[in-house]
Image: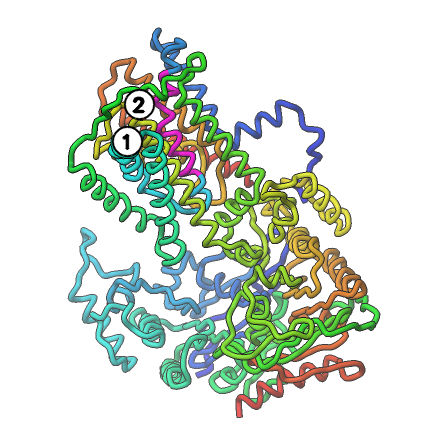
Amino acid sequence: MTLVSNSRSDTFLAVLGRWLLRNHIWSFFALTVIVFSLSSPFFLTVNNLGNILTQGAFIGILAVGMTMVMIDGEIDLSVGAVLAMASALAIGLQDHIGVWPAVLVGLASGAALGFFNGTLVALSGMHSFVVTLGGLIGIRGLVFIYTGENALMVTDFSYTEIPEVYLGPLSMTAILFFALALFFQWVLTSTRHGRETYAVGDNVEAAYDSGINVKRHKIINFTICGTMAAICGILLSMRLGTAEPNAGKVWELWTIIAVVLGGTRLIGGYGSMWMTIGGVLTLAVLRNGLRLLNTPNYVELMVMGTVLILAVALDKLLNMKEET
Amino acid sequence: MNDIILQLSGITKTFPGVTALDQVSLDVRAGEVHALVGENGAGKSTLMKVLAGLYKAEQGDIIYQGRTTDVAGPLDARRKGILLIHQELSLAPELSVAENIYLGAWPTNRFGVLKKRELRSKAQAALQALGCAFGPDVRVGTLSVAMQQMVEIARAEAFSASVVIFDEPTASLTDTEKEQLFHTIRSLKARGVGIIYISHKMDEIFQITDRITVLRDGQVQGTLETAQSDVNQVTRMMIGRTLDTYFVKAKADFGAEVLRVEGLSKAGLFNDVSFSVREGEVLGLYGLVGAGRSEAVETVFGVRRADSGQLVWKGGVIAPPTPRQAIDMGMALVPESRKEQGLVLMMGGRENTSLPHLSLFSALSVMNRAKELATFEKYRSALSIKTTGPDQEVSQLSGGNQQKFVLAKWLCAGPKLIILDEPTRGIDVGSKSAIHELIAELAEQGLAVIVISSEMPEVLGVSHRVLAMSEGEIVGSFEGQEMNEENLIDAVSYHRQSAVG
């Protein structure tokens, strides 16, 4: 009963404080922005910030789908390969069936692969780590077969101009990332599906006993994750004008890093898109800032590894405080 | 052989809000098998954890081999010669038998390198002493449960244990394996080992033990010579009488039959269970832990599948439902373990309440937050739940308030039948009587109610009719004048006694 206090007397600052405690990544984000603003004159320019958002958005879109799957207590390691598949199909098919049908086939391939992953996880009872690890290798192999181990090039270069739509400094890719993140945040907080996601991730037994169709539910989230990967792949193919069979390699790791950095927990039941946006942006700022400072690539990796562990440690620390 | 090898004196252990052990004293003689019995929550496992060094008692002494001893942890206990054999075996399935016997205490040289030959020969000796049919190099994962248990018992040889504690050792053994286990226990006993034997099974206790100590609510109720007592006496001491509480019973005004269960069976859990419950009726289901009560109702609700038997819902035979179908028909199950099965702990009261009926609280799958809040507020005031707000995580609430949310969650869709499995376990007295009142209220509104409880005053106090269950079977049905403590105890213990003979 000691925990019962009058919540109505809370001031704005107290509410903000609690929000920051749960979304500690935004404090990290602010810190990185301040550090880089002070250390590089090129960092805090409209142009550079726009760049950061565009670069971050690719991992960001993957992270949106990954967040759904991770709140469910699962993981999807195949997103990088699914992305490559979608981008290869979108470019490879457009000379035969036209641009937009090719894009649609690309999207559908992502949804189908996600559906396949989800079905395998839900029906076999195998851990998603194993299933999607298989997907990571297998789907990548399929991409190599389809592309004949070569990068596919667009013939009609108007394709690369599709995403060249800007809203001020915001590219279409960045806008799409924010739109998807906000949409799925709404799904998480305001729809049945979102409610089921948290319930399944936190206590699958209680969810099942409450009549939730856990298997169907998980399949839906894997399908969402696959679709997000396909969207990312198609945007990438538009940006580059080519589809490399190696596109998106190890992106699944950066995606997981971004989501975990944000504070969503690997064991499931806890997380949000706000956290994921924070994680994605922090990661993007770190990469960009370190490059502006001409940091060698290996130092960049060391810094990011350290930040990841620090952020998760901070999360543990804060939550221990909250619980006692 | 009457030397006391282990003596616990005045052990007291409290957890926030609960006294788990209250001045518990117990002695174990060399070469005796000493039974420790009591209902779940009586404090048996807490006591054993104190003995194994997992918990530190606030008061009291462990006097082992004549000296006051401080047990620092499980490995320390094992080295001192006190061995706890868990119900869930604590073995590493990928390691060999020899490695498991010395788990965590492997013989090594100065640099931490295993002395494999020594390990193997010592293990071999221990296995031979017990007459085990398998060698020290076998991988433990390939052994049967009974053989794995022997590996744990071999630790008693390996560490020359003088006290061995068995916690529900026969839970997953066949009859033949059980006989072998008893043979082993007798041979340990013959060599002067003191044995503590924890079990719910009365027949075993009367077969193998020399003395029985009964625990209830963290206190020792007494120690009996097994030869001079009977099942009835022990059962009585276990259950006892709790404080006289005032129970409200719903007016007996019954309507049509809501549910009839016919010949429901599941191998190893329950056998030929039949009963029916009407509108406005509170049906009690009484039995000790392990009687198969929870399993039977979980089967009705579709969480488990039966081998045979059928369900009749409102006069029509139905196929075994899934939980979703059961909910949609109008069934509700308030499970025994609210944290594991009942609540999503990271969610608040609002979200937990709407969880089984998301379709009622949403349109085109978009949640209607206002409706959720209204329902939350309704039940918060109706059940006087103490919480800071709709989104306070239920993990932060007291047991009584958590249980009220589990009730709210099942009541808000207006069920026809509500099954309450141990609805007042581990909650405070105030919440307890609030829930008793609610049961009467629900029945008077015309719901069919099934209450499962191992608290006899509770089940007698709230029910119109009580079924006694034991060893997976319904062994008695009592109504009116017949419905009293004597008859229930007789029904449950007679059945157990007949199982002994």
Can the viewer see residue A162? yes
x and y percentages locating residue B484 in the rendered image: 75, 80
Residue A286 vs B228, above or below: the answer is above
**In this rendering, do the residues under marks 2 and 1 share a single chain?**
yes
Q: Which residue is mark 1?
A: A94
Q: What is the spatial separation of the Cα atoms under label 2 and label 1, in whole angstroms? A: 10 Å
Question: Which chain does the residue under circle 2 lie in?
Answer: A
Residue A192 on image: x %, y %? 57, 45
Give the residues in magenta: A51-67
User: Left or right: B68 with respect to B117?
Assistant: right
- Asked if the magenta segment contains residue A58, the reply would be yes
Q: Work out whether A291 lies above or below A309.
A: above
Q: Residue at x 67, y 28 (%)?
A: A10
Near-viewer residue (B70 or B473): B473
Q: Residue at x 55, y 80 (%)?
A: B471
Mark 2: which amino acid? Tyr
Q: In the rendered view of the protein, which quadrant contains the C terminus of chain A? A: top right
Give the x, y percent position of residue B218.
61, 65
The image quadrant that residue B310 belongs to is bottom right
User: Is residue A292 toward the left or the right of residue B357 in the image?
Assistant: left
Q: Quadrant of residue B106?
A: bottom left
Q: From the viewer's perspective, is residue B111 above or below residue A234?
A: below
Q: Are marks 2 and 1 in contact (CB under 8 Å)?
A: yes
**Mark 1 residue type:** Gln
Q: Residues within 10 Å of mark 1 (few under 14, many from 20)?
A: some
